[in-house]
Image (cartoon, rainbow, N blue to C red):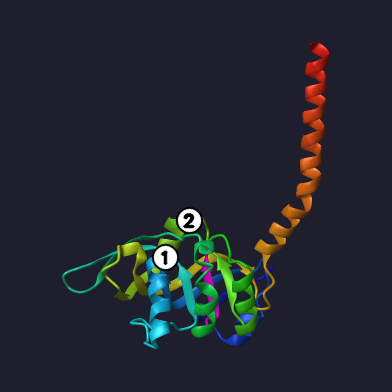
Amino acid sequence: MAVVHLNCPPSAEEVAALQVGDLVYLSGEIVVTGGLPAHKRMIEYLDRGEPLPIAMDGVFIHLPHMVEQQADGHYLIHYVNPTTSRRFDDFMPRLIRAFDLKIVGGKGGLGPAAAQAMAETGCAYVSLLGGGSPILSEAIKDVLAVAWTDFPPHFRLARLRIENLGPLTVGIDARGVSRYQALEDEARSRLPAIMARLASRREAAEAAVRQED
């Protein structure tokens, strides 16, 4: 396991060097959102061939954010908190390919179709600390832009300036090797034996009841 500090956007070589299990700290600018409506709208923009109001620049994180615009135009940062990426499995393969993303992140990983897209484009998935809002919020230094203000704050598209956002754990590397898929495969392989043990215990309990009768 390596500890890696990356400036955003990272180079293709830096992302390719990441291994599953590495710890990553990000600095620079990232694009974030936390809602299905924003993902659906991004797909609509792609369908129409329109540029997003906030350009993707290599790093896209599923990071709901509560920020409040002040009278002087600056933003008060209340907090950020990661959300589950698997909710966006239907959208992420296309977004990864269309925007040539190099790092995506959130909680809970992404499915096989997204991992395949990541292997094609050289993109890695980083897992943010669940329940780590105080640590993650400290890394947010500025809100540079917010779009789609017709959505609730968590669902808006935003560009944030960050310093040492982390620790983030590489869950899927740029070759498509997925810690999440490996754990799921392992769990599935163990299921028949678990079910057999449960059936045996059920039969033994039923036999004991019959003897008491």
Work out whether residue 66 can be spotted.
Answer: no
Camera-nearest residue between 180 and 142: 180
Number of residues whose C-alpha sits closer than 10 Å to that of mark 2, classed few (under 14), some (14–19) or many (20 or more): some
Q: Is residue 99 above or below residue 24?
A: below
Residue located at (47% from left, 70% from top): 61
103 part of magenta stretch:
yes
CA distance for labels 2 and 1:
22 Å
Q: Where residue 115 sits in the image (x, y, percent)?
A: 63, 73
Residue range in magenta is: 99-106
**Nearer the camera: disc 2 or disc 1:** 1
User: Along the horizontal axis of the image, is 96 left or right of 189?
Assistant: left
Q: Is residue 193 above or below residue 135?
A: above
Q: Where residue 127 sits in the image (x, y, percent)?
A: 56, 64
Residue located at (60% from left, 75% from top): 124
Rendering quarter of residue 209: top right
Identity, as a three-letter code, of the amino acid under mark 1: Leu
The residue identified by callout 1 is 36
Q: Where residue 166 sits in the image (x, y, percent)?
A: 52, 66
172 part of magenta stretch:
no
Lower position in the chain sequence, tag 2 or tag 1: 1
User: Along the horizontal axis of the image, is 62 left or right of 170?
Assistant: left
Q: Which mark is residue 113?
A: none
The residue identified by callout 2 is 132
Number of residues whose C-alpha sits closer than 10 Å to that of mark 1, classed few (under 14), some (14–19) or many (20 or more): few
